Image (cartoon, rainbow, N blue to C red):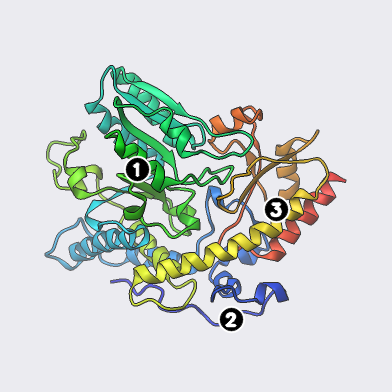
Amino acid sequence: MLMLIQKLSTLCAPNSYRDSVQTMNYDVNTIRSHFPSLDTGIAFFDGPGGSQVPDVVGAAIAEAITKPISNRNINTESEKNAEELVLEFRKAVGDLIDVDPAGVVYGRSWTQLSYDFSRTLAKNWGPGDEIVVSRLDHDSNIRPWIQAAEAVGATVRWAEFDVKTTELTVAAVEAVLSNKTKLVAITGAGNTLGTRPDLKSIGIAVHNVGALFFVDGVHLTPHAAISVKDIGADFFGFSFYKLMGPHCAALAASPALLNTLNNDKLLPSTSNVPEKFEFGTLPYELMAGCIAAVNFIADMAPGTGSNRREKIVNSMHALEKYEDELLEYMESAIKALPGVTMYGHAEHRTPTIYFSFAGRDSSEIYKAMAGKKVNLPAHNFYALEVSRKLGLGDAGALRAGLAPYSTHDDVDRLIAGLKEILN
């Protein structure tokens, strides 16, 4: 098996006094030392669209793709290498989000997985059935459900977020539930506003009407310790490239539930779960990168933990505290800029700020900031319903998102650049 990250390297010289301060054993400078892309001097605020990748992930991918490898089996060395990587990938996802590894499905992307499962689940829907989607969501957790429902004559109902508070409440979801509801698709966190709905309470309400609960965890998973068992989601998925891994995704459900689903597949392919949902030969090298990313996360905040799951929870709690403090600093500084409008106001949210400036084109600011080596993208970020409901049309606004390697110095560069452009 790949020799993945065992221990973080020694502390690099701090960029500033503030960044050398330890937060629950969270040392951002040690973490940054593993990201070659940071040596370019770019300040990255585009983490919600895709994070930078640590060296150990690249090394794991390179090792896996150049070692003896074949289609999965248990006879030759190369077959065993492939089999081991697949099983370790499922275990890593199981530890990351607290699920049974036997219910972990690999996918090329979260959008692909959403489409695959929407079509499969829709086989059991028909006229009179209802599907609930949320106006807060990324379009990948909206359009597949709408299109699948339309194809079989089911009705789509919308759970609305409050424009003033940008909260998606349990009451808002309950308002559109009925005994006709078959599935509710809700985001774990809005990818533009950062809003984190009360998933556990929503899940209880969904199950009370006998429906399935499908959670898009793409924007939540990089910022919080996830326990799908505690949330009560029937389906939960995320993208690895949002949390320092390669470009791929995973979806998890109980093996028993997956066994009840009859998806379209090739006749000779297996009917075993979870393999029957994975089409073609799997990219073993990407799976190796995912394993390395999970191991890196487990070691981000050295501390107590007798196994990988406990270490992951410890690291993510430390990261959440660090990012919350840095978010407060960034939010306060952006609020002080002239002509700014900030759109995310939920009490519980990820370190993500969606904002614009009166009389200024957000896309032009994005381009100007790129010239200052600050990645500050502007768009609707596929949260099209959010952008339209906020009156931003399809153009959207600027989005600043924090990542495990973000620092106060990065935020200072962001604010300094915006001040120069706005003056």
Q: CA distance from mark 3 to mark 1?
A: 33 Å
Q: Which mark is residue 204?
A: 1
Report the amino acid beneath label 2: Leu
The residue sitting at 44% across, 79% down in the picture is 7
Residue 276 vs residue 216, the one in the foreground? 216
* Place of residue 412 in the rendered image (x, y in percent of width and height, measured from the top left): 75, 61
- Whichever of labels 3 and 1 marks the residue nearer the N terminus, that label is 1
The residue sitting at 59% across, 66% down in the picture is 322
Report the amino acid beneath label 3: Glu
Q: Is mark 2 in CB contact (under 8 Å) with mark 1?
A: no
Report the amino acid beneath label 1: Ile
Residue 308 location, quadrant: bottom left
* Place of residue 263 in the rendered image (x, y in percent of width and height, measured from the top left): 21, 35
* Place of residue 5 in the rendered image (x, y in percent of width and height, measured from the top left): 41, 74
The residue that label 3 is drawn on is: 331
The residue that label 2 is drawn on is: 11
Q: CA distance from mark 2 to mark 3?
A: 28 Å
Q: Dot 1, how many residues are within 10 Å of its Cα: few (below 14), some (14-19), or many (20+)? A: some
- Quadrant in the picture for the N terminus: bottom left
Q: Is residue 366 above or below residue 244?
A: above
- SS at badge 3: helix
| Front tag of 3 and 1 | 1
Q: Is residue 121 visible?
A: yes
